Amino acid sequence: MIGEIVGSYRIMDTLGAGGMGVVYLAEHQVIGRKVAIKVLLPELSHNHEVVNRFFNEARSSALIRHPGIVDIIDFGHHANGSAYIVMEHLVGETLGARLRRAGRIPEAGAAAIARQAAGALAAAHGQGIIHRDLKPDNIYLVPDADVMGGARVKILDFGIAKLNAGVPQSVAKTRTGAVMGSPLYMSPEQSRGAGHVDERSDVYSLGCVMFEMLAGRPPFVGEGVGEVIGMHIHVKPPRLRSLVRGVSPAFDGLIASTLAKQPEDRPASMGKLIQAIDKATRGRFATKALGGDVVASGAQPAPAGPLPSTLGRGTGEIVEPAADLRVPMRRRWPLALIGLALVGAVAAAIAIGSRPRAPAAAAPATPDASPPAPPATAPPSTSAPAPAPPPRVRIRSTPPGARVVRVGDGAVLGVTPCDVELPRGAEARLRLTLAGYRDQELRVKPDDDRDRSVTLDAVRREPTPAPQPPRKKGDPVDPFAQ
């Protein structure tokens, strides 16, 4: 379609393709504005249910009007019969692409992304619209230095959104009882195909996304769709702190509350979830960015200019941003005066201790004078230097989500990607296990590379031979039959 005209726009390039259609970069023929045009495949454009779901994305997004929701400009049918949607052109990447590239995201970045996504979804819920297909690939990150975290979140794809009472009936609805969405992120009630799904279902899905941002994997991973759906309904999710070191107890508890099986046990709304995120992350650490990675720092005043990015890739230790990186002016002077006083006292002590001493005047000798006492000496220091931290290695696997087991005692050390502590001066034997893939053993020495990647081989299942019909009496015998 490159060069063709769709509505008022000329197709310029292909941005991406999926199972249902293709997304093109296009430009308005008069004003030159660049847009993205999602074109449904021609064979699907004749399916009325699919087209209704496709256009429902345009109608739902147009009702919300929020900076965190992708702006829909127009929709209609092309001359060849294909349905299309015209929307704003976003420059950045999806959260799914970010996770596939970086493995996971530090707690600071995860909190910033989740808070923005919750704000956009709260606006959708205010219009009676439940997303029902929230996943990393439907969360887009647009670089923006004016936003906390360095990226503005945009929610995509309201194609299977469910509209509650109060919305005009002309808006197409998804068939009640149909199980639609992404199984890795669906709430228990949505997994059961419940007829009524409210905003707490999106809270659960966002909790699954938050879990994956920090752990590098969704809360439930199985070999098939049915197994994953059953886990959402019946299996208690793992606690995040059992998989990832450094996650704060408050954030761990927050995510656990979003993954409650019963909707009434979760945060009641996205507004309540935002309050919980703010409470869990307020003012514990400051952050600074070095080469895109977030590292711990003291409570430093914020530098001039935009706030630093907290979307660097995970480096093992999780760091959280302060709610306000700037120290209030009324508190700076007492802190500064105390600091200057301490520096002055230390400098004076050093100066006095290093000043050369004049020799003491000799006392007149007397016959019964006792000899001078030897100078007192300080007792030798008994404090040993702090031991060096044990060596650690970063283990990654393709695909991720493999358990890292220590050979010998069978201890599970984590789930890839993860950091593993090595014994001092000894080789570590590790085994990576993942359902559907062959176990792979890894030997790691303390002086080896600190980042090891392993590609797991899928288990090939031999096809079951078709049963042979029973031989009838009188049939010839094949001497070569096995």
Image (tube, rainbow, N blue to C red):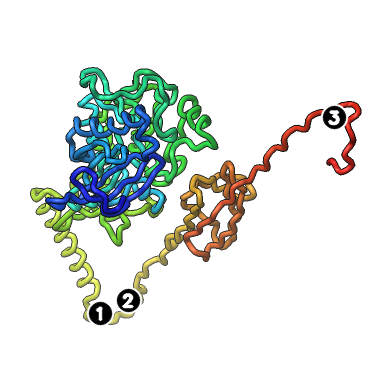
Q: Secondary structure at mark 3?
A: loop
Mark 1 Cα-neighbour bin, 10 Å: few <14, some 14–19, many ≥20: few
Instruction: Check whether the beta carbons of the residues at disc 1 and disc 2 lie within 8 A of each other.
Output: yes
Graded by Cα atoms within 10 Å as few (under 14), some (14 to 19) or many (20 or more), the crowding at tag 3 reads: few
- Between disc 1 and disc 2, the foreground one is 1
Secondary structure under badge 2? loop
Of residues 333 and 279, the one nearer the viewer is 279
- Residue 262: quarter of image: top left
Please identify the residue farthest to the front as the structure is shown. 79
Residue drawn at x 24%, y 34% as measured from the top left: 58
Q: Residue at x 53, y 31 (%)?
A: 227
Q: Earlier in the sequence, mark 2 or mark 3?
A: 2
Residue 18: quarter of image: top left
Q: Which mark is residue 471?
A: 3
Q: Is residue 201 left or right of residue 147?
A: right
The residue sitting at 50% across, 54% down in the picture is: 395
Mark pair 1, 3: CA separation? 127 Å
Where residue 70 appears, x then y in whole percent?
23, 40
91 or 342, nearer to the observer: 91
**Which residue is the site of mark 1?**
363
Percent across and percent down for residue 244 are: 43, 45
192, 303: nearer the viewer: 192
Residue 188, image x, y percentages: 42, 25
Q: Earlier in the sequence, mark 1 or mark 2?
A: 1
Q: Secondary structure at mark 1?
A: loop
**Real-space Cα separation, disc 1 to disc 2, in angstroms:** 10 Å
- Which label belongs to residue 369? 2
